[in-house]
């Protein structure tokens, strides 16, 4: 079962909302936990025990850590993280690691492939985050098992995140707030908007993207650029769309979850892009990898010595390199056990290091010339440069191998273009193109409004009832008419659910 | 102490009114690289040890919050 299935949308979710409403406030958390584990069971069957065991283990581990102090506390945290990471490595990376070791040793090792539990990459990070917060005493170990279990298993969140911090979402998950007319309206509207982005835009673009990435040598010039840009658009529409579905579901139940996107294509630098794209993964990496590495004795002492010997800027570059390397290796590796994901992480490491290295020169340039980096020509140039970085990065991310990615990036600068051949091979006709362009225009308008601080839901709420109904029905009909389903289309799985 | 902290912050970026700013982290005026560089400066200048657990926005959003953190760790 997934969020796009008819069963989920027409039976499962409405049934949860009805049961939730009929239950007393104090018991609503049991409804949500029961629904979450049922959802998981319907999707993963027997493997559900892994999720349940993780909930029990994390609940116990947090109490175990909280009872200790000093080195004992650190030892307990290390054990708990090792167990969680070990389970993730076993199911996701064991085969890849065995192949690597086998290649080095000149001997083939075989590792039994296991079913990868749905959402393991997401709930493992949430679990590690919770244990670290307990260890740092930012959060007491929770004695309410249901709250811990619901934090890790909440069904709208389990497939693609967002990766929440315990203190940000656990309390509201268990608050049992009622479903109100406003929460139902706004939540459903956000879900519809998310489905529209996924089914009208992303699923159509996937036809074009599949063609170009399955024949990386065939298309050049504008066709190669169009295919690469189409993948970036597909990824954004699908990932942000499904996050909208998650946030909308949570909004109906008046549950607070952190936002995962903040208009990423308005970024003027790669570092800004990562503060706006997959925000919760970035926040997790900053909090639980970047900061601990940066404040470790090794890095702090290295920083101190580098400052004395070579000055502040060199020390900053050195510290940044030491702290960012594990962050970006982790980011790449988290997406899967493939070299192109690791290369994707290293690609951003190099770009962010260049930003750190060139920062003083850029400051000098802008102060001497009087140009503003945030206005006029330089702002546009920085924006275009960032778009180019994003597109090249996503080609590395999507291509099967690093070599294929380089071939495709190189093809952009080679001719001749065969845009018509690409469109013909994708089986996209004029009406498909029209719907995709319409979807992209609408998404751009919504993102511009958000960037300018216009709250569309607040605006929607201020409209007369007739206008609100008209808009809601327009979105429903747009989804029915423009959704890429039925004859000529195939079901497109959620991209980030496979991570 | 607050004046010394402001001077150190200004070495990082002198375009901000640190004395009155209360959302240095929340408004993105101070990023994670800035925090890390400052932690090393504060540790040397005030002879304190600032750990990972201290690196939360509440401790770096204003000069007063930074001063409170340093006093706590002194």
Image (spheres, coloured by chain):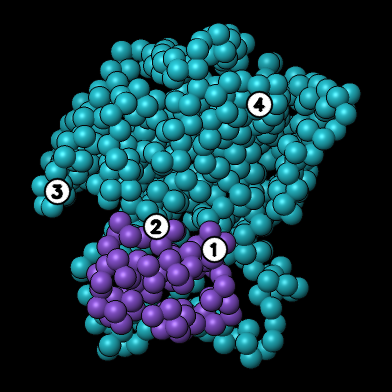
> How many neighbours does mark 2 have within 10 angstroms: few (below 14), some (14-19), or many (20 or more)?
few
What residue is shown at x 51% (from left), y 10% (from top)? A23
What residue is shown at x 57% (from left), y 13% (from top)? A21
Chain that the image shows in cyan: A
> How many neighbours does mark 4 have within 10 angstroms: few (below 14), some (14-19), or many (20 or more)?
some
- In front of the other: A195 or A300: A300
Above or below residue B53? Residue A154 is above
Please name the residue that numbered disc 1 is placed on. Answer: B23
Percent coordinates x, y for residue A253 in the rendering: 57, 24
What residue is shown at x 36% (from left), y 33% (from top)? A123
> How many neighbours does mark 1 have within 10 angstroms: few (below 14), some (14-19), or many (20 or more)?
some
Could you say which quadrant of the image residue A483 lies in? Answer: top right
Residue A183's tag is 4
Chain that the image shows in purple: B
Please indicate, yes or no, whether residue B29 appears anywhere in the rendered image. Answer: yes
Could you say which quadrant of the image residue B64 lies in? Answer: bottom left
Above or below residue B12? Residue A291 is above
Residue A69's tag is 3
Percent coordinates x, y for residue A298 in the rendering: 20, 69
Q: CA distance from mark 3 to mark 4?
A: 43 Å
Q: Chain of mark 1?
A: B
Q: Are marks 2 and 4 in contact (CB under 8 Å)?
A: no
Please name the residue that numbered disc 2 is placed on. Answer: B56
């Amino acid at each position: 079962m997934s969020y796009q299935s008819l069963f989920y949308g027409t039976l499962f979710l409405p049934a949860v909302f009805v049961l939730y409403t009929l239950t007393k406030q104090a018991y609503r958390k049991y409804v949500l936990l029961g629904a979450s584990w049922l959802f998981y069971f319907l999707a993963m069957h027997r493997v559900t025990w892994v999720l349940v065991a993780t909930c029990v283990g994390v609940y116990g581990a947090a109490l175990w850590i909280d009872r200790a102090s000093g080195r004992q506390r650190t030892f307990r945290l290390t054990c708990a993280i090792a167990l969680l990471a070990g389970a993730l490595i076993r199911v996701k990376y064991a085969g890849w690691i065995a192949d690597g070791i086998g290649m080095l040793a000149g001997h083939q090792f075989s590792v039994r492939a296991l079913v990868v539990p749905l959402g393991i990459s997401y709930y493992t990070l949430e679990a590690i985050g919770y244990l670290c917060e307990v260890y740092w005493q930012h959060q007491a170990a929770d004695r309410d098992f249901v709250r811990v279990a619901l934090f890790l298993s909440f069904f709208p969140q389990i497939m693609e995140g967002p990766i929440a911090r315990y203190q940000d979402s656990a309390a509201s998950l268990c608050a049992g707030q009622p479903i109100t007319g406003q929460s139902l309206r706004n939540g459903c509207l956000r879900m519809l908007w998310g489905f529209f982005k996924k089914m009208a835009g992303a699923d159509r673009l996937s036809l074009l993207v599949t063609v170009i990435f399955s024949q990386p040598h065939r298309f050049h010039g504008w066709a190669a650029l169009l295919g690469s840009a189409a993948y970036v658009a597909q990824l954004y529409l699908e990932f942000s769309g499904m996050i909208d579905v998650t946030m909308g579901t949570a909004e109906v139940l008046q549950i607070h979850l952190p936002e995962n996107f903040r208009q990423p294509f308005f970024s003027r630098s790669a570092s800004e892009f990562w503060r706006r794209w997959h925000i919760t993964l970035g926040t997790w990496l900053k909090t639980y990898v970047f900061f601990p590495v940066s404040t470790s004795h090794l890095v702090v002492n290295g920083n101190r010595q580098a400052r004395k010997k070579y000055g502040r800027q060199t020390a900053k570059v050195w510290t940044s390199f030491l702290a960012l390397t594990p962050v970006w290796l982790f980011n790449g590796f988290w997406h899967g056990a493939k070299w192109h994901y690791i290369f994707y992480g290293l690609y951003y490491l190099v770009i962010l290091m260049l930003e750190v290295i060139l920062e003083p020169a850029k400051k000098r340039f802008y102060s001497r010339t009087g140009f503003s980096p945030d206005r006029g020509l330089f702002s546009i140039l920085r924006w275009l440069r960032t778009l180019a970085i994003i597109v090249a990065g996503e080609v590395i991310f999507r291509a099967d191998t690093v070599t294929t990615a380089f071939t495709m990036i190189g093809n952009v600068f080679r001719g001749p273009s065969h845009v018509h051949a690409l469109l013909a091979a994708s089986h996209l006709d004029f009406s498909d193109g029209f719907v995709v362009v319409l979807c992209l225009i609408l998404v751009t308008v919504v993102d511009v409004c958000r960037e300018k601080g216009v709250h569309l839901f607040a605006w929607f709420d201020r409209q007369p009832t007739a206008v609100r109904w008209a808009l809601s029905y327009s979105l429903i009909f747009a989804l029915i008419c423009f959704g890429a389903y039925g004859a000529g289309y195939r079901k497109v799985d959620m991209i980030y659910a496979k991570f | 102490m607050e004046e010394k902290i402001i001077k150190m912050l200004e070495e990082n970026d002198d375009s901000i009114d640190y004395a009155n700013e209360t959302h240095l982290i929340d408004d993105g005026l101070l990023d994670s690289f800035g925090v890390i560089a400052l932690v090393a400066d504060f540790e040397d200048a005030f002879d304190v040890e600032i750990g990972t657990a201290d690196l939360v926005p509440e401790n770096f959003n204003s000069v007063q919050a930074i001063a409170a953190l340093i006093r706590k760790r002194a």
